[in-house]
Image (cartoon, helix red, strand yellow):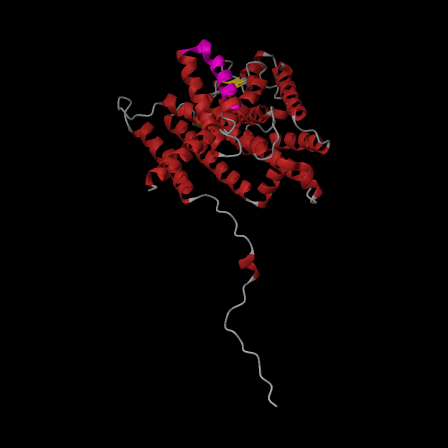
């Protein structure tokens, strides 16, 4: 009696890796095209229009426009940082202006030391210290003449403050409007501290009259364009980083915390670590934005820590569209572009326009300008499909 052997099939076994869900793409082909267009605009088109075309040319990009767009790009970085913490994690901060200002002050200290003896008093000390009859630099100015050290402070000071504050706030499970009020109170307290002359930060006047950065004159058009390009590249880099974060498992946990934190805790995740990590990253982004802002605008003072400044960051995010990444960037450009025009044409109506805009977005456009664009795109698509139907 012969035993029959089972037939062996040639079909390969399906690997476990093939059964796993594929990670989402960082960007769609259209998205990568938009990023490439932004890179070309920032690194090629803008320098050509500003530096190579004469002022009388119709396509010339003026120095004023370069400074304005560079400033708005710094604001867009702050709005992007706000979207990570508010749009994707559900934590509304009204204190991000503090992190922005701290990064700006760290850069401003280095720029003040770069003035050297070219100040009004021709002293090695900054002018405001000579005016206050200071004889030596305070201890926290000891390494302010080092560019590398001050760039480290741009990250370290906002990051450490955010880490300490966030740890105690999130550990105590402070959330919602209470967290917003505490962040606003922290910012207001810091503003009052920086207003005091004895702190060594210039009092209510702050820092200004900058001359050079890395021994290169700031007034040179090439220097201003270099700062413009650096700001644009930083904004694009932070956008790609934010996109990668929200597309990852880490980002999905953040969104789960936003939607149902108690369920996240029930499944075994610790929301504290996730919220603290994205909170610190958001503060670091604002610090970098402040450091890029100061040499382009030429001044930093405690007014950047005002509660209104932090509220405006939230407004840019809401107007553009939360939880979209590109929306806050659009919102920053839209609101600040309108502000630049209104403050010149109708300066007395600017605040009324801003208030009306925020109310209109809250009532009629909860998803912001990006949500409106998506709705219009959906209507057009449906209309096109209706025309093609028999």
Residue in the foreground of this view, choosing between 333 and 285: 333
Report the residue that reaches farthest toward the front. 390
Nearer the observer, 358 or 105: 358
Q: Residue at (47%, 25%) from the top-left corner? A: 295
Classify residue 30 by image quadrant.
top left
Position of 102 with respect to 384 (left or right) is right
Asked if residue 129 shows in the view, the reply is yes
Image x and y of residue 48, in percent: 32, 32
The location of residue 17, given as percent across then percent down, is 55, 59
Question: What type of secondary structure mainly makes up the magenta span?
Answer: helix
Q: Quadrant of the C terminus?
A: top left
Depth check, front residue: 264 or 171: 264
The residue lying at 42 percent from left, 40 percent from top is 31
Q: How many marks?
A: 0
Residue extent of the magenta highlight: 346-362
Q: Is residue 348 magenta?
A: yes
Q: Residue at x 41, y 42 (%)?
A: 32
Q: Is residue 54 magenta?
A: no
């Amino acid at each position: 009696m012969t035993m029959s052997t089972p037939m062996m099939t040639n079909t390969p076994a399906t690997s476990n890796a093939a059964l796993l869900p594929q990670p989402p793409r960082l960007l769609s082909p259209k998205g990568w095209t938009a990023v490439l267009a932004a890179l070309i605009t920032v690194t090629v088109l803008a320098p050509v229009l500003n530096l190579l075309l004469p002022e009388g040319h119709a396509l010339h990009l003026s120095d004023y426009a370069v400074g304005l767009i560079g400033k708005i790009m710094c604001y867009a970085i702050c709005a992007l940082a706000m979207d990570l913490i508010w749009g994707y994690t559900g934590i509304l901060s009204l204190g991000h202006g503090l992190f922005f200002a701290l990064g700006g002050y760290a850069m401003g200290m280095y720029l003040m030391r770069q003035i050297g003896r070219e100040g009004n008093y021709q002293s090695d000390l900054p002018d405001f210290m000579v005016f206050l009859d200071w004889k030596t630099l305070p201890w926290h100015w000891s390494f302010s003449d080092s560019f590398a050290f001050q760039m480290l402070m741009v990250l370290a000071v906002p990051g450490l403050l955010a880490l300490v504050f966030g740890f105690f706030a999130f550990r105590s499970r402070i959330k919602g409007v209470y967290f917003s009020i505490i962040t606003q109170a922290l910012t207001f307290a810091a503003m009052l501290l920086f207003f005091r002359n004895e702190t060594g930060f210039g009092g209510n006047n702050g820092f200004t009259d900058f001359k050079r950065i890395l021994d290169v004159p700031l007034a040179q058009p090439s220097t201003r364009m270099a700062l413009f390009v650096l700001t644009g590249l930083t904004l694009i880099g932070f956008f790609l980083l934010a996109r990668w974060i929200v597309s990852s498992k880490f980002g999905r946990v953040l969104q789960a915390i936003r939607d149902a934190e108690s369920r996240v805790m029930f499944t075994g995740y610790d929301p504290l670590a996730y919220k603290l990590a994205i909170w610190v990253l958001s503060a670091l982004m604002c610090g970098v934005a402040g450091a890029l802002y100061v040499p382009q605008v030429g001044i930093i003072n405690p007014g950047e820590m005002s509660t209104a400044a932090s509220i405006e960051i939230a407004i840019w995010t809401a107007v553009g569209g939360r939880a979209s990444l590109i929306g806050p960037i659009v919102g920053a450009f839209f609101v600040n572009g309108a502000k630049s025009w209104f403050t010149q044409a109708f300066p007395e109506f600017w605040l009324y326009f801003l208030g009306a805009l925020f109310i209109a977005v809250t009532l009629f456009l909860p998803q912001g300008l990006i949500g409106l664009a998506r709705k219009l795109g959906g209507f057009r698509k449906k209309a096109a499909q209706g025309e093609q139907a028999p």
